[in-house]
Every structure is written in C-alpha cells, then in structure tokens.
Amino acid sequence: MTQTDKMIARTEGAVGHMIFNNPERHNAVSLEMWQACARIMKEFGDNPAIRVVVISGAGEKAFVSGADISKFAEERASKDGTERYNAAVEAGYAAVYDCPKPTIAMIRGYCVGGGMGLASCCDIRICTPESRFAVPAAKLSVGYGHPGVKRLMDIVGPSFTKEIFYTARLFDAEEARTMGFANRVVPADQLEAYVRDYAATISGNAPLTVDSIKFIVGELLKDESARDLAACDERAAACFTSKDYEEGRKAFMEKRKPVFTGK
C-alpha cells in the first residue's frame, strides 16, 4: 500500500484507512501529501476487497488544518508552483469525492480550510464535541474555487455556505451538526469504536446496493443536463438480478445474517 512519511494507508478487513500524518503542524498538508492522497484513494477504489474508506488525521488536535504554510516558499513561490499545488489539491479532493466506495471522515479537533474541503468530499462526517470547523479564506483574502464551494453547498445549503465564508469564524461541533455538516457528534473516547462499528455496518451490507446509491446520489447532485439517469437505472436494476439479492432473501427467511459478495 502507498505510504509516505506524512501519509499512512492501512487496511483492516474490508475497511481502508488513510491518515494525514503531520500532527506537529495540525496535519497541515503539503504538495507531496496531496499527491499521495490521490494515489492512496485510487488504490482503495481499485481494490475489490475494500468496501469502506475512513479518512482521519494523526494525533488528538486536528483532522486536517489546511495547507502547510512552512512549505510555501518551495511549493508556491511562483505562479507555476502555485498552479501545480492547486492542481494537486483538487486532484486529491476529486480522488476522495469520486471514490466509488463509501467514505467516512473521522474528525478530531480542528477541521479548518482544506480540512473542511477534504471532509466535504466524504460521504459521512463523524466528529467529537471538541471539534472545530472553519474556512478562514476571508481573513487571508484567499480565493476559493467553485468546485469546493459547490461541494460544501451541496451539504449545508447556500445560506450556511455564505455564513461560513462571510464570517470565517470557528464553528463548534453542535453548529456543524445543526448545519448538516456533521452527521454525528460522538464523545472523544468513543469516536474510534463508533466509526469502526459504522464502517463494519456499511461493509456488511450489500455492496451493489451501497455502491449504486453512491453513484445515484452523485448523479443527482449534477446539473440536470449532465445526469446519466439511464446508468442510475441500470445500477438499481442490477441489484435485483444479482446473487446477493438471492442471498439477502434467503438470509431474511432463514433469520440469519446475509453474506454478500458484491456479485
């Protein structure tokens, strides 16, 4: 599995874990980390044994806190360097957002700037009461590209998106939950177990159904003219002709847990 000093990829059964490993800088992300993110997510997406991906940050203080400013002099000192960095960031985001497997952001501490951008690419966000969220772009006169704005707006809606950007302030976990950004707020000492159980629940369900829902929701979030509804119908129909559909029916009648194979 792909690894760098600042990125960790590991597997636990059907669950892939990608960890941003820069805790001394609150898991700020460098160019090479974004590049590794894209590689790791592709490997997880291409691996049929992986059914769920959990994304987290090392340590107790942060999920991801945005760009690693200490690297700006070497990575973003020129126009070409900045464009290369921005392209790597968007490629990393896209690799998470477009991953065919369900993704869970396990959030401790600060989820700021690029951290919110990354979490917005995940399907589910689970945090602790101590988690804090912000997009401080307006405090730095930083422009924010429309793909990232849309991903956030698809989750929290236009009004909360404007509030997050206009104020550039820190929002607490309950505010994030109220906005719809945080799916669940879990005590810090229970977070890992809760996410492990959630991932196990998802990975134990029928992959064809889960994957079809991810695909269909993704299509419905597109502009109406860009949606491939025929492909949505095909994926839904495929569930009913699968061996897993037969297994699900048999398991229900026999009052046992089904064993799905994704076929």
Image (cartoon, grey):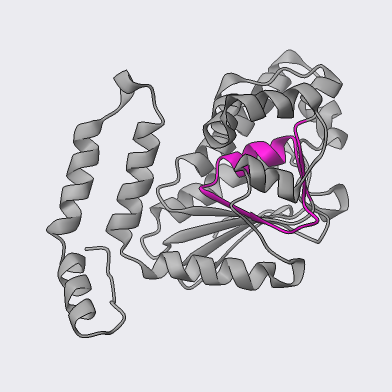
Question: Which residue is rendered at x = 18% and y = 43% of the image?
Answer: 234
Position of residue 66 relative to residue 107, above or below, is above
Image check: 199 left or right of 18?
Answer: left
Give the percent coordinates (x, y) of residue 235: 22, 46
Query: Where is residue 157, by image quadrant?
Result: top right
Q: Quadrant of the N terminus?
A: bottom right
Q: Quadrant of the C terminus?
A: bottom left
Q: Is residue 35 visible?
A: no
In front of the other: 138 or 11: 138
**Residue furthest top in the image:** 79
Query: Where is residue 117, by image quadrant?
Result: top right
Image check: 77 left or right of 85?
Answer: right
**Residue furthest front in the image:** 178
User: Is residue 130 one of those drawn in magenta?
Assistant: yes
Image check: 239 left or right of 171?
Answer: left
Give the percent coordinates (x, y) of residue 153: 57, 29
Question: Which residue is rendered at x = 43% and y = 62% of the image?
Answer: 50
Q: Is residue 231 visible?
A: yes
Give the percent coordinates (x, y) of residue 114: 70, 36
User: Is residue 105 one of those drawn in magenta?
Assistant: no
Instruction: Give the residues drawn in magenta, as a range.
Output: 110-135
In front of the other: 233 or 86: 233
Question: Which residue is rendered at x = 59% and y = 35% of the image?
Answer: 156
